[in-house]
Amino acid sequence: MKIIQTFKDESLRCGFPTKESCLNYLKKSYSIHSKLCETIIYTDTDGYNYLSSKLPELNLQVIDFEYIDGRFWNLPKLQVQSIQEEPYTHVEIDATLFELPVTDKKVITEMVRSNHIMFQYHKLGLQPKVFLPCSGLIGFNDIKLQKEYINKSIDMIRNWDLHFVDFESLW
């Protein structure tokens, strides 16, 4: 299991009030995550140049994000997940996971959404402890299922299948 994160935001704030507050939070959360397991932050070239100059201790990987429309803010996260080849948990940049989810379920998420394709969910409750100010996390132990689900979501965005592509369906 590894933790992956996506840093894609033209403002370089990722929802925080200032760049500095984003960097402070990222530094603390990365410190916690990297003690748990391998942690990789995927970003574009601009994000890499910015983060590597401010926080050189981060394990950064550059990815060329596809842009379709600004309303599809989740597309970079889906693209990062689509290249994973081993079990992972994707943690939002503004979230901190204090313990790794330990489960034999195929999919890991912090909540079950009623209109999801019905997977076996591991609903995070008191254990593991997780701090999600306004974020989410999703992970997969079953990479074959992950490829199918993530690729289906990306295809729906590419095809502008908007009746299905919304916050609920992307996660």
Image: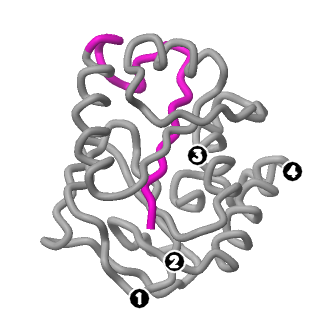
Helix, strand or loop for disc 3: helix
The residue under the point 66% across, 28% down is 70
Pick whichever of labels 3 and 2 is earlier in the sequence.
Answer: 3
Is residue 15 part of the magenta span, yes or no? yes
Q: Is residue 170 above or below residue 86?
A: above
Q: Can you give x and y, in whole percent of width and height, for residue 36 in the image? A: 28, 57
Q: CA distance from mark 3 to mark 4?
A: 18 Å
Task: Judge from the rendering whether residue 5 lies leftward or rightward of residue 169; answer left or right.
Answer: left
Q: Residue at x 66, y 20 (%)?
A: 45
Chain-order first, disc 1 or disc 4: 1
| In this rendering, the label closer to the viewer, 4 or 2 | 2
| SS at badge 1 | loop
Query: Which comes before the other along the chain, label 4 or label 2?
Result: 2
* Residue underneath mark 2: 141
Residue 167 drawn at (x, y percent): 53, 52
Contact between marks 2 and 1 (CB within 8 A): the answer is yes
Give the numbered dot on residue 77: 3
Q: Which residue is mark 4?
A: 159
Please state if 59 lies on the left or on the right of 157 as rendered.
left
The dominant secondary structure in magenta is loop
Q: Are marks 1 and 3 in contact (CB under 8 Å)?
A: no
Q: Give the left or right position of residue 161, taking residue 89 as reference.
A: right
Bounds of the magenta segment: 1-20
Q: Which is closer to the viewer, label 3 or label 2?
A: 2
